[in-house]
Amino acid sequence: MIKLVAIDLDGTLLNGEHIISNENKEAIKKAKEQGVKVVLCTGRPLLGMISYLEELNLRESGDYGITYNGGLVQRTDTGDVLSKTTLTKVETEEIFELSKKINVPCNFIDLENIYEPPYPEGRDSLYPTVMTALPYVPIIMEEMSGDIAINKTVFCYSQILLDEAIKNIPAYFFEKYTIMKSRPILLELMPKNVDKGTGIAVLADLLGFEASEVMSLGDEANDAAMIEYAGMGVAMGNATNEIKAMAQYITKTNEEHGVAYAIHKFVLNQ
């Protein structure tokens, strides 16, 4: 029996116009009415998905969200943090030095701000086209506070140039950090033990659920861990081949209300 449904946003719950279809809304409503926990699981900060939570009536007491790709588990009604894993100042500086070496722009994100250190000449970050929920704050690395807690860092640039730059990242960084693409133009670097699977596992443990009682739905590389963790890992019809290969089930695409289809099949038993 599925007791928790974890749903990625972009490419999964949202269609190409970043809209939640009425079919998906209705299926989520019915699942919640049956006592199932429905949790949005995203790389965004909580503020970046508030409008979707409100649209789905998922900001009541007892509702939860998994943000920063699993780095934060929060109550969605109050924003209270139940679990968090962050990068230190030293780690953030190390990642920034890497960005300079591979010549791509870098941003750091905490709970309140998106920081803009100096970008490579002529290579401004594209992150402002992706994330608008938090203010952008210029920062000089030497002036960064020693107790700063960074939830994640991102390299956001044109796909072709970013893919070429990724080839030049030393193996050391892949060993020390969790590094994954969440969009063609967006590479995310986080603490080693952070991924969506870990975030869902933390929440499931807090709620007393087993992995076998969890269904996860996703489409991109940053959803791999949540697909692997869940007893029922569901890939969208538009998912990457990697995600489809590891899933227990492939549902319809995000344009065909694939989330609703999977909820009806495995949760509502229709």
Image: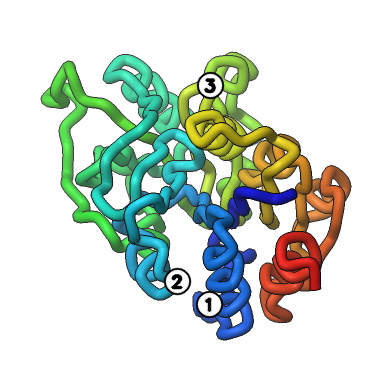
Kindly identify the residue that appears in the image at 54 percent across and 57 percent down.
Answer: 38
Left or right for 163, reference 231: left
Residue 56 got which mark? Answer: 2
SS under mark 1: loop
Q: Amino acid at mark 2?
A: Leu
In three-dimensional space, the C-alpha distance between marks 1 and 3, rounded to whole angstroms, equals 32 Å
Residue 20 got which mark? Answer: 1
Residue 23, image quadrant = bottom right
User: Residue 117, position in %: x, y?
Assistant: 25, 38
1 or 2: tag closer to the N-terminus? 1
Nearer mark to the viewer, of 3 and 2? 2
Q: Amino acid at mark 1?
A: Ile
Q: Residues within 10 Å of mark 2 (few under 14, many from 20)?
A: some
In three-dimensional space, the C-alpha distance between marks 1 and 2, rounded to whole angstroms, equals 9 Å
Left or right for 111, reference 216: left
Residue occupied by mark 3: 192
Q: Amino acid at mark 3?
A: Lys
Left or right for 79, reference 95: left
Q: How is the image coloured?
A: rainbow
Left or right for 248, reference 79: right
Kindly identify the residue that appears in the image at 11 percent across and 25 percent down.
Answer: 143
Which of 52 and 224 lies nearest the eye of the viewer?
Answer: 52
Badges 1 and 3: C-beta atoms under 8 Å apart?
A: no
Q: Is residue 237 visible?
A: no
Which of 253 and 66 lies nearest the eye of the viewer?
Answer: 66
Q: Residues within 10 Å of mark 1 (few under 14, many from 20)?
A: many
Kindly identify the residue that appears in the image at 67 percent across and 55 percent down.
Answer: 218
SS under mark 2: loop
